[in-house]
Amino acid sequence: MCGIVGYVGTRQATPLLVGGLRKLEYRGYDSAGVAVWNDGVTRVVRCRGKLANLEEKLLKEPAPGTTGIGHTRWATHGRPSDENAHPHRSGSITVVHNGIIENHLALRQELVAAGAKFTSETDTEIFAHLIDRAMTAGAADLTTAVRGVLARVHGAFAIVVLNEKDPTTMVAAKNSSPLVVGLGEGETFVASDVTAILAETRKVLFIEEGELVTVTAKGAVITDFEGRPRQREPKTITWSALQAEKGGFKHYMLKEIHEQPRSVADTLVGRIGAEQDDVSLDGVNLDVASIRRIIFVACGTSYHSSLVGEFLIESLARIPVEVDLASEFRYRDPIIGPGDLVVAISQSGETLDTMEAVREAKKKGAKILAISNVLESSIPRLADYAFYTHAGPEIGVASTKAFTTQLVALTLLAIHLGRRTKKLSSERARELLGELLQLPNKMRDVVESGAQLQAIARRYGHAEGFLFLGRGTQYPIALEGALKLKEISYIHAEGYAAGEMKHGPIALIDEDLPVVVLAPRGTHYEKVISNLAEVRARQGKVIAVATRGDSNIGNSADDVILIPDSAPELQPILTVLPLQLLSYYVADFKGTDIDQPRNLAKSVTVE
Ligand code: M6R
């Protein structure tokens, strides 16, 4: 998730580009750069780190001119560095890109064989080389050249392309990643979202999937990738700047809940093999035969995803797994050594307890695999191997999209291991991967059911406590549901294994206690329904999360939230969504500070 901007007009481009990038920095800040055309030459100024570094550099290396493109980066392919910073260039072409190109390796090999010299590790650079070659080969214009290249590229992208030979025209295109055009008086803007251009114009064209747009100072011409015209009426944005930063959502947390289908799709990109029965882990080369045991270490929400990971790996790969809270692990002199693979999960990659657990495990000779959302953060750098989720920056303190992408990463890891231990057949792997690919659509379906959750939240928002119950892979989801509610609504909540209820928490149940029961279709269904009956018999109020088509559950619950059916291994990725929405709406109802709840920090870098 990067931020891109472009400007063509009569004003100086650099201040407008930098102003736009400042608004997009929430999308990533591993590096920033601009390319501005002046007097026949495109000057590229870019550097590692936040936008402030670029601004400083621009003081020493000004980039005057009235046409330009800019970028702020969230690293996915290639570490954060000056060389990997966008814009990328080949010949007369410069490009900025947001997204992931699935077939970039094959295209890169082909280009290298044809003599192209790459200067970065990014997937983006292939665009610059391919478009430059198309222009050199005699494409009629930049639009035609870009269109030809798009036909060869698979993946998610929004790009803006500048041609040194014709600064009056920029070309942008969108497939999955967001793109908007801003229309001014004798000037036109392009950006990842409206926040970047709102200070300059409120008249915008939202670019849709599979569209290419030719941008000049006079306006924009939209076509599809085949060149067929697309008509679009400009819209006038009435949002305030702050509303716009949150994509029109009231809070970052709600925006991030809604971003999950996209983040999950991004986390899958390029990892499923051509036969669709195996997974590649981006160059992570585990010696699977030597793994005796896997130990997860993590904190908070990442600990909950580890608990799901335990189920997935034990069931699909039949490797023994243990899960430990990082803060406990590091102080209990754990018995580990060579043959153990320690998997450290951390969204931020900076959590001190997890980092120290990794150091302890390393000291004792274990191999470390980090699963993180932040490229080159401290924990992946300490680890022997790193595998990344592609959730994009998570701003709300309560983790949502990081969690579901961790579950996807763990499913990919379990399938990868299962194929190598030969405990997972090619057929079952293909089924699971097929279902994984369908998940984003199913997730979209669930996150759009906000109105129902809002009504439920209003009904139970006064409660003094909540209980969350689940079995099997739904037990960690019960823990996660309780954590979400606690941290943003300040209501006490317990997550419990449903079978444990009768060993204690059943004493809590009365008519004032809402009990959220995770009851999707599957092996534990009957047992969970019995637990649910036990709650109802004690006048507890039951909110059930069940599978669409379950006609029984309505008789045993006060409220039922239905989710689409899926393979049991993937159900947690769907059942957690209503729990995130429930806690969000309860907190909103109570009026708490949802994005920055009291006493909490996004990244806990102290003990
Ligand atoms: O960045 P990490 O995944 O290492 O963070 C771990 C926890 O601090 C984090 O998950 C925390 O529990 C969240 N606030 C949960 O929403």
Image: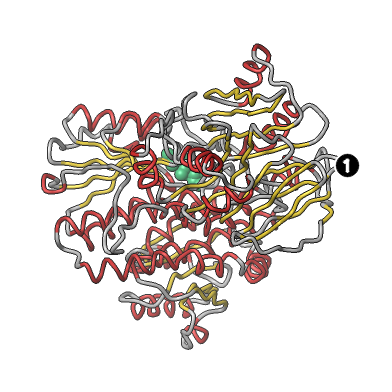
Which residue is nearer to you in this view: 572 or 53?
53
- Any atom of ligand 1 within 8 Å of the CB at mark 1? no
Does 194 sit left or right of 71 as displayed?
right
The kind of residue on which mark 1 rests is: Glu
Which x, y percent locates residue 316? Answer: 23, 62
Which residue is nearer to you in this view: 80 or 373?
80
Which x, y percent locates residue 445? Answer: 56, 70
Which residue is nearer to you in this view: 303 or 259?
259
Q: Residue at x 80, y 41 (%)?
A: 217
Q: Is residue 244 visible?
A: yes
**Residue carrying label 1:** 185
Which x, y percent locates residue 394? Answer: 55, 43
Image quadrant containing the C terminus: top left
From this view, report whether residue 289 is shown above or below residue 558: above
Image quadrant containing the N terminus: top right
Which x, y percent locates residue 139? Answer: 58, 47
From this view, report whether residue 574 is shown above or below residue 413: below
